Image: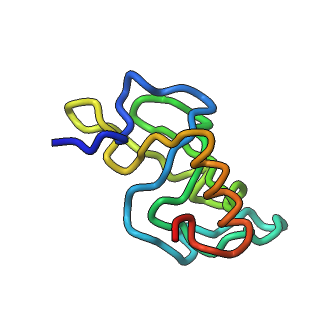
Amino acid sequence: MVEPNVLDVSQLSVGLFVEYLGPTESGPDVTMVHAGDAEPLCDRLWHGHPGVISEPAPQHVLVSWVGLEEAVASFAVGFSCDDQGYYRGLGVLSAQDHETRRTRILDGKPPTG
């Protein structure tokens, strides 16, 4: 059974608000930036972290994560769907939930609390 907010392939579009459904992650695999770029505003990808789909290629969906826009988590780490067309690592967010979580992240807090 799939949770109700899990992204499915029929919903893919640039600009769709999403959340990260995996466990909280930190370290260079998440926060590394190109040489000369400023450090990201956030030091981890939280469970529930808000983002916006930037590349909706079905087998490599890229998300621009709040506070990690220039980090590897946003420009290199992609999400693939399962055989049923679900992206179990991504959930769909409303614009209001995205904004609430974005504000919390930029204030240095976890996205939900």
Q: Residue furthest top?
A: 10
Residue 94 percent across, percent down from the top left: 54, 39
Q: Nearer the viewer, residue 22 or 34?
A: 22
The number of discs equals 0
Please state the horizontal and vertical placement of residue 60, each as a whole percent of the image. Answer: 45, 38
Write down the quadrant of residue 23 in the picture.
Answer: bottom left
**Is 102 rendered above or below residue 1?**
below
- At 35% from the left and 31% from the top, the residue drawn is 8
Q: Is residue 9 left or right of residue 83?
A: right
Measured as percent of width and height from the top left, residue 1 is found at 15, 42
> In the figure, is residue 59 to the left or right of 100?
left
- Residue 45: x percent and y percent? 53, 66
Residue positioned most to the left: 1
Residue in the picture at 30% in, 36% down: 86
Q: Is residue 40 above or below residue 1?
A: below
In-image side of 81 versus 102 (left or right): left
| Above or below, comparing residue 11 to residue 46 in the picture | above
Colour scheme of this structure image? rainbow
User: In the figure, 19 relative to 83: above or below?
Assistant: below
Frontmost residue, 46 versus 76? 46
> Residue at the location (74% across, 62% down)?
34
